[in-house]
Image: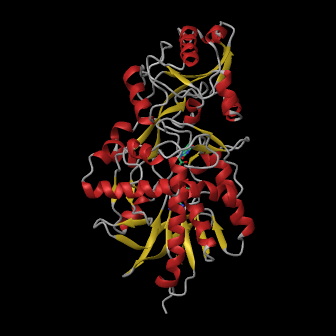
């Protein structure tokens, strides 16, 4: 018997939502799991998620909803449309898996882990409200991730081994496929260790890697700021074992990262969550005029910013002059997140007259928009969902208080990565599954094509994380 033949654990790499979902799926099948995370703290980019997680139909939605698949296909854009018939079918199978498992993903989080996801918003590109978050103070990424982690620590302390500061440096293979990992313990002089078992690889995306993979695949985006943690990338480990890269140029430039008045030129931006527009926020250009239907998809809103808004002149960072403006009704609907943004000075609450120097025409623009909301008719841009906006045109005076902050487009999400199939298997360059390893989350490719809908990343983590974990656990019997 070889040293790894007796392995009786699944190895999960990465402690974001994809890795945590996979780990729980393994435990649900009664198998053991070891989770390796290179950072000192768990959660990856997942813990920052601030708008919510999609699912349909669910008991939390205010309207019946059978349009999620249609919206997902529409959002996937030219890469999907221009794919040949085989590739199209592969992408459709992934989107179908995502949507068909979305209800059970939401109920898994609410009913099994007790996560509050009872508030539902409609984000850009969605034709129904279907992005779930909690009704209390916790942002959705933090609420979900911390609950899943806490359960691993408290309820499964015998079956789950959780190791932070451990960076996987190599995937170990034999003639059958992947059989384990080599990793360095960053707390003990980077000592190399090996561990054997089937692997779930959930190491996240590369939107924070502006000097590495962004330079390689999208040099035009190099000077853009990002919402994502800059960290060494691990996709090369999959390339080393023959993983097929796909859609690497497909990088989501989110329309709204906050430009902090205290550090306007910082490359690290806080995301102005899509929820802020979904629940009523509008966008104004540097002349104080609306220029887009704020409820369009992210790529469309970003393109409108490039087309209609002024770019700042700066050699080190590319940013545009755009304002996000909310009335009191919208901020009430959004809830406690607003307080956080105000605390960070990213949004300011002031009288309309106090914004007039920075945002010319602001009073006229707000009055016009308030009239359009009252009439339920946005003549210029065709917005039809107005979120929590309640301000009436006759209430708009110099003294009316509003909330506003500066935003600019930011690198946010990578649709590309290593191709998977609906069983969450990574595919090699011959389009065949690589044995002994499964993948989920932002490292994978094929689910979103040209554009990801807001709320569908947390969802893919749960859906494909659970599939990956289940298959890896089942394979323990046959492969190891
Ligand atoms: C500010 C912000 C807000 C967002 N809001 C939303 C939202 O509201 N809804 C939504 O659906 N999506 C949202 N997203 C996107 C979403 O959060 C992420 O795409 C998704 O959570 C990625 O999850 P993941 O598990 O694939 O990766 P991550 O959560 O990034 O986790 C990957 C983990 O793997 C670890 N790792 C990497 N390499 C190694 C290695 N070699 N060895 C060991 N560990 C390794 C990393 O340190 C990291 O902890 C948001 C993203 C950001 C940045």
Decide if residue 444 is in sight here: no
Name, please, the residue furthest toward the bottom: 1
What residue do we see at 46% from left, 37% from top? Answer: 125
Q: Quadrant of residue 431?
A: bottom left
Q: Nearer the viewer, residue 36 or 146?
A: 146
> In the image, 452: left or right of 81?
right
What residue do we see at 67% from left, 27% from top? Answer: 331
Decide if residue 399 is in sight here: yes
What residue do we see at 61% from left, 10% from top? Answer: 393
Name, please, the residue furthest toward the left: 84
Q: Nearer the viewer, residue 426 or 332?
A: 332
Q: Nearer the viewer, residue 403 or 257?
A: 403
Residue 402 x/y as whole percent: 65, 18
> Considering only vertical position in the picture, is 88 above or below 173?
above
Colouring mode (rainbow / by chain / secondary structure / one colour): secondary structure
Q: Nearer the viewer, residue 468 or 314?
A: 468
Residue 415 x/y as whole percent: 41, 49
Residue 171 x/y as whole percent: 44, 71
What residue do we see at 45% from left, 71% from top? Answer: 437
Q: Quadrant of residue 40?
A: bottom right
Residue 264 x/y as whole percent: 55, 27
> In the image, 425: left or right of 391?
left
Q: Quadrant of residue 369?
A: top right
Q: How many marks?
A: 0
């Amino acid at each position: 018997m070889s040293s790894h033949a007796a392995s009786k654990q699944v190895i999960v790499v990465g402690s974001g939502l994809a890795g945590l979902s996979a780990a729980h799926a393994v435990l649900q099948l009664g198998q053991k799991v070891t989770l390796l995370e290179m950072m000192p703290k768990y959660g990856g980019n997942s813990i920052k998620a601030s708008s919510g997680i999609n699912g349909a139909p669910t008991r939390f939605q205010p309207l019946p909803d059978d349009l999620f698949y249609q919206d997902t296909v529409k959002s996937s854009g030219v890469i999907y449309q221009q794919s040949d018939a085989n590739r199209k079918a592969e992408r459709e199978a992934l989107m179908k898996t995502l949507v068909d498992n979305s209800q059970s993903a939401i109920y898994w989080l609410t009913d099994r882990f007790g996560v509050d996801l009872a508030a539902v918003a409609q984000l850009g590109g969605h034709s129904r409200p279907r992005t779930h978050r909690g009704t209390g103070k916790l942002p959705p990424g933090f609420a979900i991730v911390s609950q899943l982690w806490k359960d691993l620590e408290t309820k499964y302390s015998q079956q789950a081994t959780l190791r932070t500061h451990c960076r996987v440096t190599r995937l170990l293979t034999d003639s059958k496929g992947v059989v384990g990992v080599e990793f360095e313990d960053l707390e003990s002089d980077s000592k190399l260790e090996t561990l054997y078992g089937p692997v779930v690889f959930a190491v996240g995306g590369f939107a924070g890697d502006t000097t590495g993979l962004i330079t390689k695949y999208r040099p035009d985006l190099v000077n853009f700021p990002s919402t994502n943690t800059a960290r060494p990338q691990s996709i090369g480990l999959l390339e080393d074992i023959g993983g097929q890269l796909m859609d690497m140029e497909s990088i989501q430039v989110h329309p709204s990262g906050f430009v902090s008045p205290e550090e306007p030129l910082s490359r690290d931006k806080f995301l102005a969550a899509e929820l802020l527009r979904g629940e009523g926020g509008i966008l104004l250009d540097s002349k104080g005029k609306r220029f887009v239907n704020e409820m369009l998809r992210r790529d469309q809103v970003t393109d409108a910013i490039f087309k209609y808004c002024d770019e700042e002149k700066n050699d080190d960072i590319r940013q545009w002059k755009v304002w996000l403006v909310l009335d009191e009704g919208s901020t009430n609907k959004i809830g406690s997140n607003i307080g956080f943004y105000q605390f960070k000075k990213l949004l300011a609450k002031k009288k309309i007259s106090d914004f007039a120097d920075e945002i010319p025409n602001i009073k006229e623009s707000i009055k016009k928009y308030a009239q359009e909301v009252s009439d339920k008719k946005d003549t210029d841009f065709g917005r039809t969902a107005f979120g929590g906006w309640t301000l009436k045109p006759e209430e708009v005076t110099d003294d009316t208080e509003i909330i506003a902050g500066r935003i600019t487009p930011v690198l946010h999400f990578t649709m590309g990565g290593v191709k998977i199939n609906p069983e969450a298997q990574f595919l090699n360059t011959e389009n065949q599954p690589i044995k002994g390893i499964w993948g989920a989350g932002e490292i994978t490719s094929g689910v979103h094509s040209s554009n990801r809908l807001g709320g569908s990343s947390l969802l893919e983590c749960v859906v494909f994380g659970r599939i990956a974990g289940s298959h890896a656990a089942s394979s323990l019997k046959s492969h190891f």
